[in-house]
Amino acid sequence: MCGIVGYVGMRASQDVLMGGLKRLEYRGYDSAGVAILSTDGGLLAHKRAGKLSVLADDLDSRPLSSGTTGIAHTRWATHGAPTDANAHPHLADGGKLALIHNGIIENFQELKAELVAGGEEFLSETDSEVAALMLAREFRTHSNLTTAMQAVVGKLEGAFTLLAVHTDAPGVVVGARRNSPLVVGLGDGENFLGSDVAAFVAYTQKALALGQDQIVTITPESVSVITFEGDPVTPAEFTIDWDASAAEKGGWSSFMAKEISEEPEAVANTLRGRLGADGVVTLPELDVLFAGDATISRIIFIACGTAAYAAMLGAYAIEKWSGIPVSVELSHEFRYRDPAVGAGTLVVSVSQSGETMDTLMAVRYAAEKGAKTLSICNTQGATIPRESDAALYTFAGPEVAVASTKAFLSQVVASYLLGMYLGQRNGVLGESESKKLADDFDALPAQLEEMVETGPRIKELAGWMADTRSVLYLGRHVGYPVALEGALKLKELAYIHAEGFAAGELKHGPIALIEPGQIVFVIVPSPRDPSSLHSKVVSNIQEIRARGARVIAIAEKGDAAVLPFADEVIQIPLASSFMEPLLAVVPLHIFGMELAGAKGLDIDQPRNLAKSVTVE
Ligand code: M6R
């Protein structure tokens, strides 16, 4: 949470910094600020509560300076309300030093008490300001911003990325990171820092990811990295595989609308080069998990939110195709319950951002216990894949809207590929079943296009439901994670009470919620499925209809059994059972977006949320 940008070079830094903040605004959007070392040797800063546009409007009418060194921040408040005073940067040393922070400094109360006792005055309620005041003190002692930063980080506990500039260190930006992301953009005569590569991809596609507990110093001509102990480090360089246009709205009304339209492509890109027409899955990136004849006897998925629902689908598929027992846990529950993991356990994290703090901590916990770790991730250079034994990247492209859509589909596909790979490796998944799955995957992108085209119809439905106060979602087997995902989208986007239930649970409690007019989405399994799930779910529909529910069924084309009982039917193309959830979820993504739109809400930046949850 919080987006940070640093720049040093030959361009007007205000433009670079504001452009970077615009691309990082999804990380936090309750206030923003910028600080620039001006050409006349001073430091100019401006910060405002509210969305980035408030700051941008101010700077349009009163630009800061033509200085070419600066830092900027977009905030998601943790300590202190979103006010002008609590916005970053925080200034110290009589306005000569500016600092921005992402994370939580856990020992800030005691540090603050020491600083106050030493005569320092605080202007904000944030934990971050302690770092600014401490850095100013250390700079007075060391006269070197990097050494001063090293002295400060040694005293901080918790999670932090810090960036700082000082008028007595012109042409220098210093950054430090622990448990919070920071990447370096490598330019020609200029260098960049950012919470993620979106901050600077408009200028360079060459980047370095900083490791845990490292400090970076950038000047126009140099990038030097040391550990918190002062030892030099050479981080590996990587190339960003998308360009700035991929992170633009490109004529769409919202990033979410654009990203839903990209769901078919996200699936196709995640499959590309990994699945042959014969069904054989090639994933050389996983070889490392089997080094020295290692075996996997158990898999635990860890993830949060939408990523956890993708993991549930992955778990069903992997266990079926490979015979390996698989469970799914929320990352924040996993590590606090003392789970029995160790050699033979593969812990698979699923994270779009690769920076979710709860998931990162769970990965570290699993590694400490001796488990192998695999990251399913959409973001190159992110901390979770870098700290995992292996990484299976999804190729959904940058996802900017806070509500996850195309990343969800790509996570499911990557998990399915993992299941096929493991099943083929241990001989449980046979040739004909593999080939059948390859055919299913082959058809999927075009079928998803069909689902994206349901948009106008779903918009109409959302239009007449704008005043609704509660929506329920029912699904069974692979329809259950879809129900959970549909409900989460509605909560986070339209601020409507929504719950997803396993349809089999209905009579164990949730049916008591049904009263006349209650809207219920039901994800109906295919009637072609050999199990009896279809008829069971149709019975559920009858039960809730009898109690006055308004049923919107998502059902296979030609499923005549649902028609008499549903108020609306959204049809999905004929697909195998593991492909159905990928198709059924698309109208639910659209519904969440359109209901938020019908209520006049901000679709891309829902209240109280941020895209990357980098604090616990
Ligand atoms: O970056 P991650 O995939 O780790 O994020 C996990 C969740 O925070 C995320 O999926 C969240 O639930 C979305 N806002 C849901 O749309």
Image (tube, rainbow, N blue to C red):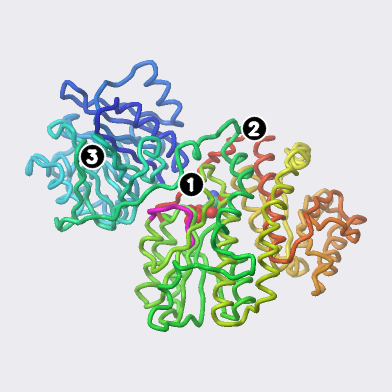
Q: Is residue 377 left or right of residue 154?
A: right
Q: Is residue 146 left or right of residue 603?
A: left
Q: Quadrant of residue 387?
A: bottom left
Q: Which residue is mark 2?
A: 600
561 over 47 or under it: above or below: below
- Specify few, some or many for label 1: CA neighbours under 10 Å numbering under 14, 14-19, or 20 or more: many
Front residue of 355/582: it is 582
Q: Is residue 98 left or right of residue 603?
A: left
Q: Amino acid at mark 2?
A: Gly
The residue under the point 39% across, 54% down is 382
434 over 404 or under it: above or below: below
Q: Amino acid at mark 3?
A: Ala
Q: Quadrant of residue 87?
A: top left
Residue 324 highlighted magenta (yes or no): no
* First along the sequence among labels 1 and 2: 2
Q: Which residue is mark 1?
A: 611
Q: Which residues are magenta?
A: 376-382
* First along the sequence among labels 3 and 2: 3
Label 2 near label 3: C-beta < 8 Å? no
- Please name which of the two marks, 3 or 2, marks the residue nearer to the observer: 3
Q: Amino acid at mark 1?
A: Lys
Query: Can you name the residue that lies furthest to the top here?
Result: 61
Q: Is residue 306 left or right of residue 226?
A: right
Q: Which residue is mark 3?
A: 164
The residue under the point 54% across, 60% down is 273
Q: CA distance from mark 1 to mark 2?
A: 20 Å
- Please name which of the two marks, 1 or 2, marks the residue nearer to the observer: 1
Front residue of 447/117: it is 447
The image position of residue 27, as x and y in percent, is 44, 43
The image position of residue 150, as x and y in percent, is 16, 51
